[in-house]
Every structure is written in C-alpha cells, then in structure tokens.
Amino acid sequence: MIRYVIFLGKPGSGKGTQAQYFSRFGWIHLSTGELFRRHLQEKTVLGSKVEQFVKRGDLVPDDVTFSLVEDFLTKVEPDSRIIFDGFPRSENQAQLLEYWTEKTGALLVAAVEFFLPDDEAVRRLLNRYYCPSCGYVSNEPGLCPNDGSSLVKRTDDSEEVIRKRLADYESYAPQLRTFYRRKGKYLAVDATKKPSQISKFLESVMLRNDL
C-alpha cells in the first residue's frame, strides 16, 4: 500500500527542508515544481502540454498537472511512502488525488500546513539556493551534498515574484484547509520553529509503527 502525506504551506515555509530530512527514512519527495521542470527539460509528451501554458503565462490546468503526478505515481513501488510538496493547489486537485487514493487503495497519513509570516518567507527565499539536478535546497551557496552540482538561485526568487506567489498561495489555501479538516487529516505546524523541532513533531506522525 502506498502511504502519503501532503505538505501545505507558502513558499519558504520549510516544506522542502522537511522533505529532505524524511528522505533519509525512505520517503519520496514529490515536488510538482521539480516535476514540471524535469518534463520541460526532457521534452516529454506531458512536458509539451505544460509548455504551452507556461509560454502564455497561464496556470497549468488541474487535469494536466494531475497527469504528471499520476505518471510519477505509476512508477513508484507499491509500498512507497510519498511526500506531496506543492500539490494539491486547489480543491479540484485535492478531489482528483482523492479519486486516485480510492482507486489504488493508498493511505493519506496527514495533510500538514506550515505557517510562516510573509516577511519571513520573503527573507528566506531571497537567500535560498537549490540544486538544479536533484532539487536539494540550502540557505547558502556551495555544492550539493547529493551529487556535487553547484547550488544556484532560482531566477524567479525576486521579491516581486515571491510576494505574488505568497498571494497566490493564500488564494487557494483556505479551501484545502477545509477539505482536509473535513477528512480529519489536517495538522498545522509553526514554521518559525527550528527545523529540528518541526522534524521531531512530524516524526510522531510520519514514522509511527502502524504506517
């Protein structure tokens, strides 16, 4: 049985940092942003569908986004544990994921939202570096500890773009909170705490013996 958690939270709230931490325990980090970039770089059929919307500056439709996610899920082992980062981003996407869950018999462990003030999110993102190969995230330049690639800044990590992304998140977050509260799966964490404190809390949820 596939087991999964959903990390909700505005950009810079630490979702990626926690996903990296739990990858040590065998959790697979599914970042839709990285998924989009990989398909675009590899010029796949699904990537070409994404590209037509990206070029126009439009949001990628829910069905196209879910096609990429579902394609990824067909390639994982049947007993995988997965962290969804950046998906779902609407109630419709959440419902598509719910249909997949029912169809496959997968288990949603929890939907965890990371809360962080906007100004702190901006500060973090302006000092963020990532690995273009594997998506590893750091708050300082250097080399990726996973594959030795040079860490770089994202071209869209400017304050203007960051604040737009923060506003975008607040436009859809309330409906997701409601959706997962109704399912009894919603949890909230204070993302201003130290990463180690957040990890300890999440361990009690994600590393239970009954999962």
Image (cartoon, grey):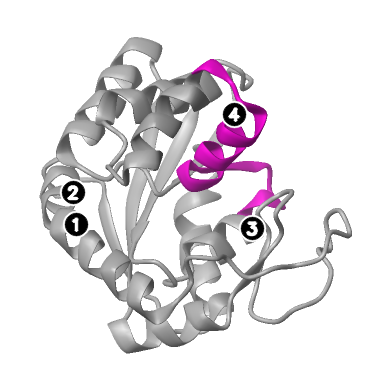
Which residue is under mark 3?
20
Distance of label 4 from label 2 (alpha carbons): 24 Å
Do the residues bearing badges 3 and 4 touch, measured as CB atoms within 8 Å?
A: no
In the rendered image, residue 6, in percent from the top left (x then y), is placed at 38, 46
Q: Earlier in the sequence, mark 1 or mark 3?
A: 3
- The local secondary structure at tag 3 comes to helix
Q: Residues within 10 Å of mark 2 (few under 14, many from 20)?
A: many
Distance of label 1 from label 2 (alpha carbons): 5 Å
Q: Earlier in the sequence, mark 3 or mark 2?
A: 3
Q: Earlier in the sequence, mark 4 or mark 2?
A: 4
Which residue is under mark 1?
173
Q: Residue at x 24, y 35 (%)?
A: 94
Whether 18 is drawn above or below 132: the answer is: below
- The local secondary structure at tag 4 comes to loop
Amino acid type at image mark 2: Leu
Q: Quadrant of residue 29?
A: top right
Between 170 and 28, the one lying in front of the other is 170
